């Protein structure tokens, strides 16, 4: 089986560009920073199965989720930083 075509998913602070709280700094532009407030990450009503369906219909053979990007935000609860999902 050929694995030449796949999808990388960069799902992090930069996904949300709207400020969710009064007087907070929202993520602006394409790049998140280590200074973006964790409360900006508020995924609601996600349909990750739809992501898989789209990838499959495009012919993707694999998907890669970037769980920690250059801004340092972790998609898991980390004991080493508060810049994470919890």
Image: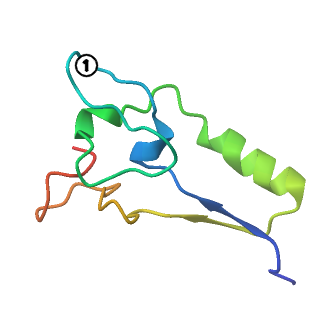
Observer-nearest of 64 and 83: 83
SS category of the residue bearing label 1: loop
Place of residue 7 in the rendered image (x, y in percent of width and height, measured from the top left): 70, 63
Q: Quadrant of the N terminus?
A: bottom right
- Identify the residue shown where x is 27% and y is 31%: 25
Coloring basis for residues:
rainbow
- Identify the residue shown where x is 82% and y is 55%: 56
Place of residue 58 in the rendered image (x, y in percent of width and height, measured from the top left): 87, 55
- Identify the residue shown where x is 66% and y is 43%: 49
Q: Quadrant of residue 27?
A: top left
Observer-nearest of 40 and 32: 32
Extreme residue toward the bottom, this view: 1
Place of residue 78 in the rendered image (x, y in percent of width and height, measured from the top left): 18, 60
Classify 85 as above or below 16.
below
Q: Is residue 9 left or right of residue 26?
A: right
Q: Quadrant of the C terminus?
A: top left
Place of residue 83 in the rendered image (x, y in percent of width and height, measured from the top left): 21, 52
Q: Is residue 3 left or right of residue 9?
A: right
Q: Quadrant of residue 14?
A: top left
Q: Which residue is mark 1?
A: 21
Classify 20 as above or below 56.
above
Q: Is residue 52 left or right of residue 35?
A: right
- Identify the residue shown where x is 38% and y is 66%: 70
Label 1 packing within 10 angstroms: few (<14), some (14-19), many (20+)? few
Classify 58 as above or below 70.
above
Extreme residue toward the front, this view: 29
């Amino acid at each position: 089986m050929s694995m030449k075509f796949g999808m990388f998913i960069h799902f992090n602070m930069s996904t949300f560009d709207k400020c969710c709280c009064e007087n907070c700094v929202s993520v602006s532009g394409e790049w998140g920073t280590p200074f973006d407030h964790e409360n900006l990450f508020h995924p609601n009503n996600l349909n990750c199965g739809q992501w898989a369906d789209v990838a499959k219909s495009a012919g993707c053979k694999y998907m890669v989720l970037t769980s920690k990007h250059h801004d340092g935000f972790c998609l898991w609860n980390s004991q080493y930083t508060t810049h994470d999902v919890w």
